[in-house]
Image (cartoon, rainbow, N blue to C red):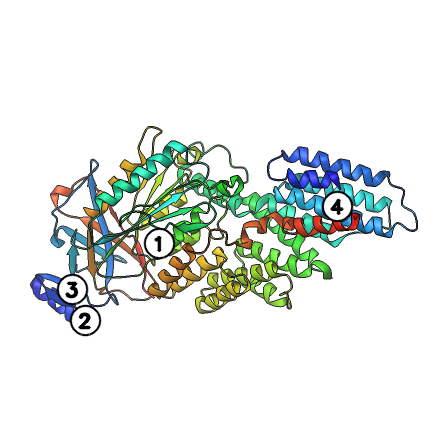
C-alpha cells in the first residue's frame, strides 16, 4: 500500500516512467505472495490495487505505459487463474487508445498542423506533425472500435458507450453518437458519467443543428452537475445560435461569475479512472486496517 | 432615388427613423451590423462617409443605410490568460495595462475583466470604475498550467445584440489549449452569430510563432479583429491601448439586406473606395447567419 500511496502522492509531478517503475515494484510484490485456496480477500485487494495503479498512469495521460502495464497484468492473470480478467482493464486499454490520439488538446494540435500544412505547404509550417490527419483518423477509428468492444461487458457498458460516443462526435458521426448515448439506461448513480452523457448528447445535437434539443440537453447536464463550466458555455452558445442573444449573454455572464472552486467533471474526463483515485485509495486503506 | 430619400425608405421599412441626418434603427431585426476598420501603415484612416464604402452580401451590392464612427459607447471585455505561460513581468504590465485602459474609456463606456486558466472568471472590480481590478496568479500549479482559451473565446463572442453600444473583446493568451470542451471549429462557427470585434494579443512564447495559430487567426479575422503578436520587448499595455484606439477609429456600417435570401449563411465583402484608403488594410465582419 505504501508504494501506491507514494505513487498517488507523486502523481502530479513525478516523471511518468518513474511512476511506472514504482508500480512495477507493487506488481512484483504481489507476484511474490503465494496464492492459496483462501486467497480471495488478497486477490480482491490486489485487483483494486491494480485498478488504482492504472488510474495513476491514466491521470498523467501516459498511454504507452498504461498499455505496457495492462499487458503485464494480463500475463499475471494467465498465471494466476483466480484473478481472472477485469473488465476495467479492458476499458483501460480503450481509454489509453483515446489518450493516444484524441484528447481535445491533441486533436486541436493535429487540426492546426493539418490546416497549416494545407495553407502554407511543406516546410513553411511547424516541424513535422506528430500525427497526420490520416493517422489520427486511423487511431480514432481504432479507439472507437475498442470502446464498442468494451461496451459488450455489463460492468463497463455505460462508460464505454459514453466515451465511445465522444469519439464518434470527433470523427464527424454525431447521429451515431446520439443513438449510442440514447441506448444506455439510467446511470444517475454515477454522477460524472451521467453529466458526460448529457454533455455529449448536447454536442451531438448541436452538430445536427437540433439547437432546441441541444439547449434541453445542456440544461440536463447542468441539472446533473450544477455550475459545470463546459455545460454552461454550451448552453450560452446554443441560446446564441437560437438568436436569443440577451439570454445567451446573461448565461455567459453567470458562467463567468460561478465560484472559483466550482468543478467541471470535463476537466478530468480524459484522465480515465483518475476520478476514482480517492475512493479507491480510501477503500484499500480501510481493508488494510 | 437620392440617398437621403433612400435612407428614409429603409428606415420606414425596418421600423427606424432618421434623426440628425442619421438613420436610427429601433430594432436589430433585419439590420446587419458590420464593424469595419481601415488601417494604413499602422494608423487608422478616419473621416470617411457611407459613400466611401461598397458592401456586398453574398456578392450582391447593398445600400448602406447608416454609418457611425465614435458616437456610440463601447463595451470592452479584457480576457486574460492567467496560465503559467504569462510571466511575472507580464502580470505587472497587465495591471498597468488595465489602469491605462480604464483611463482611455469615457464615462459612458463599460469594461469588464475576465481571467482564465481552466476556469473562466469575471473579476470583481475593486477600484473606481470602469476598469480597475486585482490580478493575482493562482497558487495551484496544476490548475494554473491548464488553459481553456477556446471556451474563454467563445464566451467573449457571446454578447447581447444591441444597436446603441459597440462590443470589443481583447484576449491575451499564448494560444496554448488543453482544457476546453469545445474546439476552434465551434469558435469559427460562433463568429457568424456575433457582432463583437475580437482582437487577440499573443504573448511571446512557443505558440506565438505564425502560422501555428491559424485557426485562431481565422476566427479573429472573421470578426473584423486582428491578431497582434508581441515580441519579447513589447508592452502588453501598449497593445491593449492600440486595440482600443483602432476600435474607436473604426466604422460601423448597417444595411437592410436586399436581393439576397435572408436564411442561411451570408458572406460579406467590404471595400473602401475613397482614394485615401488606397493600399490600406480593411478589416470587417466577414459573415453572418441570417436564421
Q: Is residue B264 left or right of residue A128?
A: left
Distance from Cα at disc 3 to Cα at disc 1: 24 Å
For residue A83, say whether it is visible. no
Q: Quadrant of residue B3?
A: bottom left
Q: Earlier in the sequence, mark 3 or mark 1?
A: 3
Chain containing mark 4:
A
Q: Nearer the viewer, mark 4 or mark 3?
A: 4
Residue named by callout 1: B157
Distance from Cα at disc 1 to Cα at disc 4: 46 Å
Few, some or many C-alpha atoms within 10 Å of disc 1 (few <14, some 14-19, many ≥20)? Answer: many
Q: Earlier in the sequence, mark 3 or mark 2?
A: 2
| SS at circle 1 | helix
At x 60%, y 36%, the residue is A13
Q: Do labels 3 and 1 touch, CB within 8 Å?
A: no
Few, some or many C-alpha atoms within 10 Å of disc 2 (few <14, some 14-19, many ≥20)? Answer: some
| SS at circle 4 | helix
Residue named by callout 4: A50
Q: Do labels 4 and 2 touch, CB within 8 Å?
A: no
Chain containing mark 1:
B
At x 12%, y 48%, the residue is B48
Amino acid at each position: 500500500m505504501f508504494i501506491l500511496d507514494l505513487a498517488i502522492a507523486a502523481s502530479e509531478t513525478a516523471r511518468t516512467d518513474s511512476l511506472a517503475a514504482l508500480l512495477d515494484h507493487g506488481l512484483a510484490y504481489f507476484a511474490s505472495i503465494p496464492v492459496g485456496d483462501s486467497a480471495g480477500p488478497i486477490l480482491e485487494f490486489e485487483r483494486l490495487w491494480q485498478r488504482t495503479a492504472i488510474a495513476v498512469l491514466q491521470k498523467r495521460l501516459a498511454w504507452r505505459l498504461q498499455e505496457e502495464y495492462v499487458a503485464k497484468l494480463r500475463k499475471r492473470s494467465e498465471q494466476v487463474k483466480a484473478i481472472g480478467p477485469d473488465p476495467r482493464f479492458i476499458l483501460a486499454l480503450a481509454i489509453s487508445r483515446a489518450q493516444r490520439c484524441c484528447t481535445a488538446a491533441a486533436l486541436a494540435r493535429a487540426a492546426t498542423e493539418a490546416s497549416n500544412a494545407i495553407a502554407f505547404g511543406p516546410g513553411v509550417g511547424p516541424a513535422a506533425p506528430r500525427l497526420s490527419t490520416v493517422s489520427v483518423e486511423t487511431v480514432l477509428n481504432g479507439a472507437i472500435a475498442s470502446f464498442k468492444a468494451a461496451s459488450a461487458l455489463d460492468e463497463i457498458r455505460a462508460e464505454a458507450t459514453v466515451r465511445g460516443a465522444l469519439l464518434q462526435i470527433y470523427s464527424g458521426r454525431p447521429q451515431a453518437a446520439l443513438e449510442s448515448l440514447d441506448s444506455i439506461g439510467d446511470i444517475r448513480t454515477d454522477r460524472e458519467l451521467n453529466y458526460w452523457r448529457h454533455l455529449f448528447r448536447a454536442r451531438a445535437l448541436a452538430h445536427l443543428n437540433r439547437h432546441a434539443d441541444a439547449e434541453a440537453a445542456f440544461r440536463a447536464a447542468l441539472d446533473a452537475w450544477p455550475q459545470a463550466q463546459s455545460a454552461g458555455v454550451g448552453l450560452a452558445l446554443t441560446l446564441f445560435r437560437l438568436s436569443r442573444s440577451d439570454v445567451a449573454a446573461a448565461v455567459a455572464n453567470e458562467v463567468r461569475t460561478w465560484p472559483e472552486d466550482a468543478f467541471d467533471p470535463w476537466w478530468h474526463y480524459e484522465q480515465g479512472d483518475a476520478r476514482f483515485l480517492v475512493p479507491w485509495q480510501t477503500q484499500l486503506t480501510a481493508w488494510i486496517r | 432615388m437620392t440617398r437621403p430619400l433612400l435612407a428614409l425608405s429603409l428606415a420606414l421599412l425596418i421600423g427606424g427613423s432618421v434623426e440628425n441626418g442619421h438613420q436610427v434603427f429601433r430594432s436589430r431585426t433585419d439590420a446587419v451590423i458590420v464593424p469595419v476598420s481601415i488601417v494604413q501603415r499602422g494608423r487608422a484612416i478616419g473621416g470617411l462617409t457611407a459613400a466611401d464604402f461598397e458592401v456586398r452580401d453574398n456578392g450582391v451590392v447593398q445600400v448602406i443605410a447608416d454609418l457611425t464612427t465614435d458616437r456610440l459607447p463601447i463595451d470592452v471585455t479584457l480576457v486574460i490568460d492567467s496560465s503559467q505561460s504569462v510571466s511575472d513581468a507580464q502580470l505587472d504590465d497587465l495591471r498597468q495595462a488595465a489602469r491605462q485602459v480604464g483611463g482611455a474609456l469615457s464615462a459612458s463606456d463599460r469594461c469588464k475583466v475576465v481571467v482564465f486558466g481552466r476556469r473562466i472568471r469575471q473579476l470583481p472590480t475593486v477600484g473606481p470604475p470602469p476598469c480597475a481590478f486585482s490580478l493575482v496568479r493562482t497558487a495551484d500549479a496544476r490548475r494554473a498550467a491548464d488553459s481553456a482559451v477556446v471556451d474563454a473565446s467563445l464566451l467573449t463572442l457571446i454578447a447581447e445584440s444591441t444597436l446603441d453600444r459597440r462590443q470589443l473583446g481583447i484576449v491575451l493568451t499564448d494560444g496554448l489549449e488543453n482544457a476546453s470542451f469545445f474546439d476552434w471549429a465551434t469558435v469559427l462557427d460562433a463568429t457568424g452569430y456575433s457582432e463583437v470585434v475580437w482582437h487577440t494579443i499573443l504573448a511571446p512564447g512557443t505558440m506565438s510563432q505564425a502560422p501555428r495559430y491559424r485557426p485562431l487567426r481565422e476566427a479573429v479575422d472573421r470578426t473584423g479583429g486582428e491578431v497582434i503578436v508581441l515580441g519579447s520587448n513589447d508592452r502588453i499595455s501598449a497593445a491593449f491601448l492600440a486595440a482600443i484606439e483602432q476600435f474607436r477609429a473604426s466604422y460601423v456600417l448597417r444595411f437592410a439586406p436586399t436581393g439576397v435570401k435572408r436564411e442561411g449563411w451570408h458572406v460579406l465583402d467590404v471595400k473602401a473606395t475613397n482614394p485615401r484608403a488606397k493600399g490600406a488594410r480593411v478589416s470587417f465582419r466577414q459573415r453572418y447567419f441570417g436564421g
